[in-house]
Image (cartoon, rainbow, N blue to C red):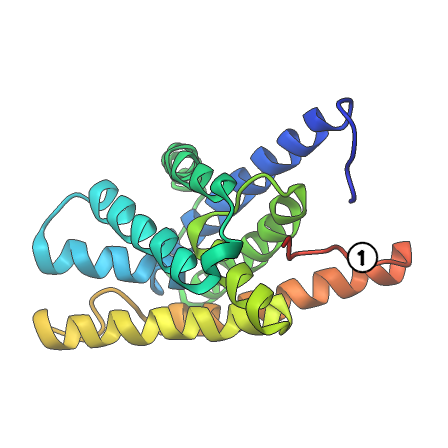
Amino acid sequence: MQLNGEELTVKRILLFILGLFIMAFGVSFSIVSTLGTTPISSIAYALVLITNIDIGITTFVFNAALILLQFLILRSRFHKKRLLQLINCVVFGYFNTLALAVVSQIPFDGSVLMMAVFLIVSIFLIAFGIFVYMPANIAPLPGEGCVEAVAIVTGWRFSTIKIGFDATMVAIALLMCWLWYATPFGAVNIGTVISAFMVGFTLRQINNIYAHITGKPVNMVHK
């Protein structure tokens, strides 16, 4: 997916938007499953529970903090283009609203089987959405931007760092709810924990399958 030239700029933008759209559906499936929010949304939702502030505000504050974290990690290698992530947050928020409205119309009986199915679909869609939009190299969502920043500095695999990053977000959300909310499981549940480990693993498998079919893997990290 190495895209060069003016003609391919449109393709990059379309891949980027499509990836965010797919991810939004992944987040929506996780919400409807009732098994817990996605790892990257867990801290923002924990802030909602603790402060009673609107989820849009807490999400923006959390994402802004992640952009600052990228600056601290990359320092001189922090490109101004990364500030476009602030625009991504607005677009992704709109897609989340739209996707949740659609997914909420899907019949859901609350059974363990349906919850598991929705969780599996959520994990796949989030991983596939990352696989689609990251190589477009326009501007990642702040969560993936942090993962990418660590990959640039350390040289570790993106998917491996993604697992560790998501697990860290879940641990922080649990600690926040334990300290300042009625229960540590207010923002997360078993589905959140599973997603923390499985999104990165699924992303790696998708990339491996793509590499096997095409003969080359997709580059997730852009320096």
Q: Residues within 10 Å of mark 1 (few under 14, many from 20)?
A: some
Q: Which residue is mark 1?
A: 210
- Local secondary structure at mark 1: helix
Q: Which quadrant, please, contains the N terminus?
A: top right
Q: Which quadrant, please, contains the C terminus?
A: bottom right
Q: Nearer the viewer, residue 177 or 168?
A: 168
Can residue 12 be seen? Answer: yes
Position of 212 compared to 28: left or right? right
| Residue 175, placed above or below residue 207 | below
Can residue 198 be seen? Answer: no
Amino acid, disc 1:
Tyr
Position of 85 compared to 8: left or right? left
Q: Nearer the viewer, residue 26 or 112?
A: 26
Q: Position of residue 217 (x, y in %)?
A: 80, 59
Position of 17 compared to 2: left or right? left
Q: Nearer the viewer, residue 116 or 143?
A: 143
Q: Residue at x 36, y 65 (%)?
A: 35
Q: Nearer the viewer, residue 111 or 84?
A: 84
| Residue 9, placed above or below residue 86 | above
Q: Residue at x 25, y 41 (%)?
A: 56
